[in-house]
Image: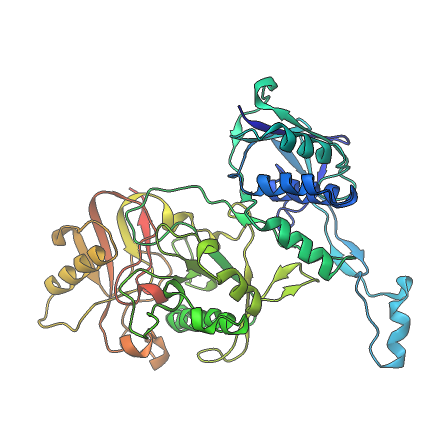
Amino acid sequence: MSLIFEMEFLTGVCRAAREPGDDAPDWPPQPDRVFSALVSAWAARGERSEERTALEWLEQQPAPAIHASDHTSRTTPDVYVPPNDSRASRAADTYIKVMPERRPRQPRRFPVARPDDPLVMLAWPEEPEPVVFDALDAMARDIGYVGHSASLTRCRFLSGRTVAFRHPAGLARRRVYPGRLRELEVAHRTNPVRPSIRPGAPNFAQRSSTSELSSDWLVLEAVEGAVPDIRAASLVCRLLRQTLMSGYRKAGREDSIPEEISGHTSEGAPTRHPHLAIAPMAFAGFPHADGRVFGFALIPPRGTALDGIEGLRAAFESVAPYRQVTERRVLTLEGPPLNEPLRLAPAPDEGTRRRSLSIGPYLESSRVWASVTPIVLERHLKRKGEAEKRELVANACEHAGLPRPDTDRIQVGKHSAIDGMPPARPLAGEPPWAQWKAPKSLSSRPLVHAVIEFEQDVRGPVLLGAGRFTGLGLCRGLVG
């Protein structure tokens, strides 16, 4: 038995953006959007206790399978609309701007999906008790639209025993989680006219990986400010970690920053366990690549989801306020090595983001891996030649939870096999800034680029060496 939510778009189109500020339509509609529609119906029906219990049951369930047809994205022009929250300043000549016809206009797009079949179904594996089912169905039948108010719908809940699916199941990109109902209530109570509601948590597909790090990445793209050269990216990664830790302090959790974030125990000693890694996302591995950095990725330890790290969501929101104009949270980095503030925001979904921000090349299975940023060796070299360097790279693979490769299948040198990456050591005659920068504790360690061939396929992410938690030693799989 299973629980089915049936939704039909009566006008044949779905008006909804995949992400705040995104031009891509949200097709198929995600579970968090459906849940928000149910909560809206619950509020309109008088916030009945038995229906609240049903919503709390639903937010405890795993992400549903989604049965939906293919679609065509309808192109839409920019529409210039006045912001809803215009306010006059103390200057007298600004008062006239609060009038609707005088408000400044902001460009907006309203993405539209035209599905081949307007009927969508979400399927949960467990069917609830009859009283919960009846409450959910009553709320569903009072849903007038999902997404934009022009996306008129007919909705209901069904028993899995009576349903024949028209389309194969797909995975949900976003999911509802315990506490989501409470978040929506707080958002509406804080601003009833225009509540600030973030999307639900990402639902990442499980990947097999021998790495100590997870495939659950949060990619932050640079939206304002100059991004330093990739050779200084390690210092920016360190600054980003410090900014996240400051978010814990702003959220009143200074004494409970977890080891997964700080990399240190409560006594201040370096942790012996894997912790959050931060890596630059650069224009690399493509023809004409130049190594420009377009953002940074937060990579949690293996077996840990970002939203499962205690206090991280609250800390991130403390340092990344929500911008109504762009409908995105924006985190500001300030301080060395930056000459000006650098602002980062969560990147769009994987299929619609810039290719340089795609995590795919870092996660795909490969037998041969090459360093994008140079590997920081664990100690100073005791002898000349490549043998010791290969040995230390093999050790780095073991320390990262990977199979130990044969040292004869490791190539080390100054240059990267990935197009667009600077050499590990400056070329003769290059200026001082051409040297890779590393945190002070690692600044005297030798750096090498490497190509590593394992005996079997290895799934990423692969980050190696003493600087792997601050953006150094980041690798990509090589095809062939």
Q: Is residue 100 visible?
A: yes
Q: Is residue 26 visible?
A: no
Foreground residue, 168 or 233? 168
Q: Is residue 362 above or below residue 430?
A: above
Residue name at image x 54 percent, y 58 percent: 346
Quadrant in the rendering for residue 57:
top right
Quadrant in the rendering for residue 480:
top left
Q: How is the image coloured?
A: rainbow
On the image, the x and y values in percent for residue 97 come to 87, 70
On the image, the x and y values in percent for residue 203 come to 50, 44
Please indicate whether residue 138 sits to the left or right of residue 478 in the image.
right
Please indicate whether residue 409 sits to the left or right of residue 257 in the image.
left
On the image, the x and y values in percent for residue 66 come to 56, 32
Foreground residue, 326 or 119? 119
Q: Is residue 208 above or below residue 280?
A: above
Q: Is residue 144 above or below residue 90?
A: above
Quadrant in the rendering for residue 34:
top right
Foreground residue, 212 or 74? 212
Tell how many labels. 0
On the image, the x and y values in percent for residue 63 come to 52, 39
Residue name at image x 17 percent, y 57 percent: 394
Please indicate whether residue 445 sits to the left or right of residue 174 in the image.
left
Residue name at image x 17 percent, y 59 percent: 395
Return the residue found at the far left. 383
